[in-house]
């Protein structure tokens, strides 16, 4: 009788355990199914095409032709059925990139501008998250302005055109979209060049989308050290953070070097500090890209364009121009403001933090900003 009671008890226990386990399993499956349902095609605006993972494997030759690394994954070259080349970005990790993935598909899929990289399609299948972009045959801007001694370099006319392209792309994001879009991570790695060296801004899927009536947003996000506006330390972010980053990129293009170049002597390591010193000495001609003969030929005009960068780099963000005004300055219809402040402020980086698998400088020890990152270059 004891055996019967014990057997019945164990049977009942395992029965209850099986029922509970089945409920948990079904609940999790339903939850996962719900997660994937949110990526249904009819909920994704714009004209983006939905691809299956097998289609992308075929068009990328099983992801063998790698173009580079992005902030959340790798980028591969692919070819559509009609022979069109594309760039396929495969996102790593499901939980961390889920919201950013939706933001990329919803935002970029509905935006079309000649100076913004176009999203062609996406894949949301099981745990796979991929984005398909137009292919930019000349890669990112950094490879053209930072790599010295290469056979082909960008001359002055090309750099002027690229500066204008970036300004027009940012003007569209800030002022011409249905929602104001802050890029928050403008840098040469996120400026891509097509076969004719037209510049297009990429990687704005993690931007903060701001309603038209909002002038600023308090955010916990951060961009890339060296391109961050000083107001990041106060966590009050407006579209002027992009204007500041644009100013840094312009200086890098005019000087042909990174804003932080550890190969330089210590006093010349930081481009903004060097620029300020040369401005005070009235020797700005010294820092025009010395490795490019065409830039040297147009040194006086290059130095004149440096004043545009200075205006964009004002520590007080209210003194920086809007990007539409920058476009007018570049077109020659508006003059650069006088009495500019050359005491540029850049956030200090005392520590280091690992974000999305990449080691990057911390913005500052006492800042309230959290370790949230924008996706890297495509």
Image (cartoon, rainbow, N blue to C red):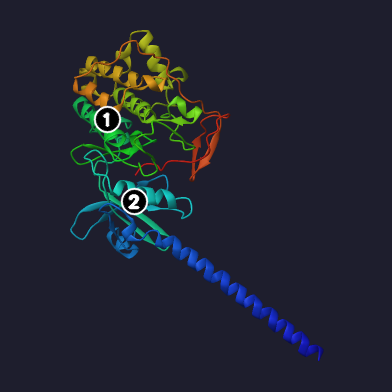
- Residue depicted at 38% across the width and 9% down the height: 280
Outermost residue, front direction? 213
Mark 2 crowdedness (10 Å alpha carbons): few <14, some 14-19, many ≥20: many
Query: Circle 1 sits on which residue?
Result: 167
Query: Which quarter of the figure is the N terminus placed in?
Result: bottom right
The quadrant in which residue 197 appears is top left
Asked if marks 1 and 2 touch (Cβ < 8 Å), the reply is: no
Query: Which quarter of the figure is the C terminus placed in?
Result: top left
Mark 1 crowdedness (10 Å alpha carbons): few <14, some 14-19, many ≥20: many
Q: Is residue 294 visible?
A: yes
SS under mark 1:
helix
Q: How far across and how far down the image is residue 20, in percent?
A: 62, 73
Q: Indicate whether 225 appears above or below 301.
A: below
Q: How far across and how far down the image is residue 66, in percent?
A: 34, 51
In the picture provided, is 9 more to the left or to the right than 145?
Answer: right
Q: Nearer the viewer, residue 179 or 112?
A: 179
In the picture provided, is 28 more to the left or to the right than 161?
Answer: right
Q: Nearer the viewer, residue 40 or 361?
A: 40
The quadrant in which residue 255 appears is top left
The quadrant in which residue 143 appears is top left
Outermost residue, bottom direction? 1
Query: Circle 2 sits on which residue?
Result: 105
Q: How far across and how far down the image is residue 15, in percent?
A: 65, 80
- Residue depicted at 39% across the width and 45% down the height: 70
Q: Which mark sits nearer the N-terminus, 1 or 2?
A: 2
Q: Is residue 271 visible?
A: no
Label placed on residue 216: none
SS under mark 2:
helix
Outermost residue, top direction? 281
Tally of numbered tags: 2
- Residue depicted at 34% across the width and 51% down the height: 105
In the picture provided, is 216 more to the left or to the right than 163?
Answer: right
């Amino acid at each position: 009788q004891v055996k019967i009671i014990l057997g019945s008890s164990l049977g009942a226990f395992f029965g209850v355990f099986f029922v509970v386990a089945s409920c948990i399993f079904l609940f999790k499956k339903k939850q996962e199914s719900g997660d994937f349902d949110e990526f249904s095609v009819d909920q994704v605006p714009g004209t983006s095409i939905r691809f299956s993972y097998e289609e992308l494997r075929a068009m990328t030759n099983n992801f063998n032709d790698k173009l580079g690394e992005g902030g959340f994954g790798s980028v591969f070259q692919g070819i559509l059925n009609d022979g069109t080349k594309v760039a396929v970005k495969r996102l790593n990790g499901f939980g961390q990139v889920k919201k950013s993935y939706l933001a990329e598909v919803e935002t970029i899929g509905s935006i079309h501008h000649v100076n913004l990289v176009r999203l062609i399609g996406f894949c949301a299948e099981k745990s796979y998250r991929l984005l398909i972009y137009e292919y930019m045959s000349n890669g990112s801007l950094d490879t053209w302005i930072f790599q010295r001694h290469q056979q082909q370099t960008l001359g002055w006319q090309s750099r002027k055109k690229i500066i204008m392209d970036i300004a027009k792309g940012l003007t569209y994001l800030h002022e011409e979209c249905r929602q104001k879009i802050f890029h928050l991570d403008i840098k040469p790695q996120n400026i891509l060049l097509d076969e004719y060296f037209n510049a297009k801004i990429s990687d704005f899927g993690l931007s903060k989308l701001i309603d038209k009536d909002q002038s600023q947003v308090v955010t916990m996000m951060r961009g890339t050290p060296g391109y961050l506006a000083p107001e990041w330390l106060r966590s009050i972010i407006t579209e002027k953070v992009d204007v500041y980053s644009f100013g840094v990129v312009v200086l890098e293009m005019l000087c042909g070097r990174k804003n932080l170049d550890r190969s330089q002597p210590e006093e010349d390591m930081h481009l903004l500090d060097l620029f300020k010193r040369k401005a005070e000495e009235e020797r700005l001609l010294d820092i025009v890209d010395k490795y490019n003969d065409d830039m040297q030929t147009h040194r006086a005009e290059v130095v004149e364009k440096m004043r545009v960068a200075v205006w964009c780099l004002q520590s007080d963000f209210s003194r920086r121009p809007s990007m539409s005004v920058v476009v007018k300055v570049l077109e020659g219809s508006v003059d650069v403001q006088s009495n500019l402040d050359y005491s540029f402020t850049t956030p200090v980086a005392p520590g280091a933090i690992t974000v999305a698998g990449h080691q990057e400088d911390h913005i500052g020890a006492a800042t309230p900003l959290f370790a949230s990152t924008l996706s890297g270059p495509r």
